[in-house]
Amino acid sequence: MSVLFDIFDPKAAPRPIGIDLGTTNSLVACVRDGRPECLRDCDGVALVPSVVSYGARGHVVVGAEAARLQSAHPEDTVASVKRFMGRGADDPETRRLSSLRFEPPTSEADSRVVRFRVADRVVSPVEVSAEILRVLAARAREELNGVGGVVITVPAYFDDAQRQATKDAAKLAGLEVLRLLNEPTAAALAYGLEKKQNGTFAVYDLGGGTFDVTILRLDDGVFHVRATGGDSALGGDDFDRAIAESRVLPALGVTAPGPDVRRLALDLARRAKHALTEHAEVELSLPREGSAPLVLTRAELDGILRPIVERTGVACRRALRDAELSPTELTGVILVGGSTRSPTVRAYVRELFGVEPLCELDPDEVVALGAAAQAELLAGEGGVDDVLLLDVLPLSLGIETMGGVVDKILPRNTTIPAEARSTFTTYADRQTGFELHVVQGERELAADCRSLARFTLRGIPPMPAGMARLEVTFSVDADGLLHVSAREVTTGIEQRVEVKPTYGLDDDAIEQMLLSALDHGEDDLAARRLAEARIESEQVLTVTRQALATDAALLEPGERDQIEAAMAALVAALDCANASLIHLANEDLERATHAFAGRRMDAAIARAIGGKQLGEVERSVEGAKGIEAHLAAERS
Ligand code: ADP
Ligand code: MG
């Protein structure tokens, strides 16, 4: 009986979790005893700084410890990796910040993913995010009896590539994604708004380095994103800088601070900022002999922060305009993000929207709490249909037509999952193929939108222009990911593609990362494989070079060119430090030198026969490979 009890104890079953994978901080939450709550470390801290620091021999540190390592190892420590998710190496956003070393892309496909060189390896944003997710999942596993699926939140404006990259990171961390959820929707769910009322809400999210505002409309349990906006370079970090520059550095008596002093000043500034959220005045003792402590009041802080906070108003007013609303038409405003703790920010939001913002839930935790609630619903039985209808498409999806114009098949704000079709025709006589270019965005010209995929429907029988009828179907699943199929109606020729956004990581690449992630931390198998491949190749190259020099007479016409081309390809493969490429190039070189090696062996045998008895010759033939090696050694 007790055994049965154990088996059916619902608490013993793996639990669904919700994760807020933030730019500055990340959190994990789950529903316990019917209420969502954040999972904390042994010191009671829920926030995990989204910082990953890499060391030698596969060593990886995540969170507060990594944040501490940042000043000593700025190049090996990745912070704010969310800004790079789904971004290409030449994306302007990619280069804007960061002390990181960017790995130059080696091919066009490669340039779709930005990569950083850290310590002894090269990593992509997906891999860095996976490290953060692993730590959060480990915390959940420790607290719960296993993790049974996860809802991860993403900004409402995240495009297909950024969403796909987030899902890939989860896969890499060994997590099953129940679905991705828009952050503002998660915040609204945490407040249970979907159960209470229809209406229009603004979600005001001010984090460490980013500001996002979203206007959500709630209709019978379905949230529509009416408008999004924000500033990707505005947040609590700007507060810290302003406080440091106007008060802390002058008090320290430094006019031209070096990086260490700057960091110290920023640290003091942040501590003062946090303290002034609770208290009317703080006293900071300065690490400078004989100097009086720095006293800062809330009113003074207000004066410093106000001009920065007012910059959020620009994006808010624009979002309201996009949603065709005036502030007074809002049902409520939800505060999200650590910086909305600040009284200056709260006062400004109250003024701007003319309502008392909802802030009973911790603004740091509210997104993770909503994600946990959603995970619980998705993992549970019943009611799934209702909750599947929670979101809408953030950006329009369409097809490029004649003249580079976009035909929008699924307009933005369509509730997902969704499906729509559109019919096209051929524009040239006897056209037997039709190239489809799938794009995402609001602009009219395909060139101004984000390219998601290209594919060709072939085998259409030759017909006069305009006769073929091509039916293109777009369907978007609950995660906001797109599947496209095209069918020529008169012949029934059909093709389906799953539109994996072309940001560079295909299934194989993910699989590869998954494999190398399995033994992550203990013994970096991938790095070892690479090192072995490298050593082997370098030997092969040396031996081949020597053979070309000494046995040039044995080469057939054109053979040297072929061998040298294969050698150059191997050298190039070594340069990009990719074990499987090196392996392939090695095989190619082996093929290119095969006949030449045979002739050299024959020659070696002939030389051996020249001065020896038959028995020795037989042994020489058996050890033909040995001769080869022996000759190489002799000549070096
Ligand atoms: P993100 O969404 O970018 O991951 P968070 O929502 O975690 O960021 O917000 C981090 C920011 O919140 C930091 O700039 C931090 O200084 C600020 N913050 C945290 N607590 C407080 C507080 N008590 N008063 C003012 N700002 C705070
Ligand atoms: Mg956040």
Image (cartoon, rainbow, N blue to C red):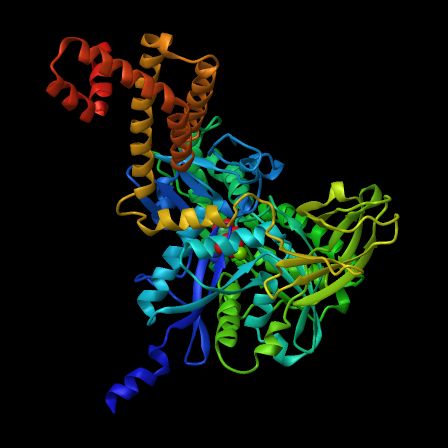
Q: Along the horizontal axis of the image, is 347 left or right of 628?
A: right
Q: How many callouts does the rendering have?
A: 0
Q: Is residue 475 above or below residue 440?
A: below
User: Residue 577 at x, y = what percent?
Assistant: 40, 32
Question: In this rendering, does residue 401 appear at all?
Answer: yes
Q: Is residue 255 above or below residue 195?
A: above
Residue lying farthest bottom? 1
User: In the rendered view of the protein, which quadrant contains the C terminus?
Assistant: top left
Q: Nearer the viewer, residue 550 or 528?
A: 550
Q: Along the horizontal axis of the image, is 454 left or right of 583?
A: right
Q: Nearer the viewer, residue 43 or 576?
A: 576
Residue lying farthest front? 614
User: Residue 87 at x, y = what percent?
Assistant: 57, 43
Q: Is residue 289 above or below residue 362?
A: above
Name the residue rendered at 44%, 60% in the picture. 27
Q: Along the horizontal axis of the image, is 373 left or right of 471?
A: left
Name the residue rendered at 53%, 72% in the picture. 374
Q: Nearer the viewer, residue 431 or 297?
A: 431
Q: Along the horizontal axis of the image, is 154 left or right of 157?
A: left
Residue 88 picture quarter? top right
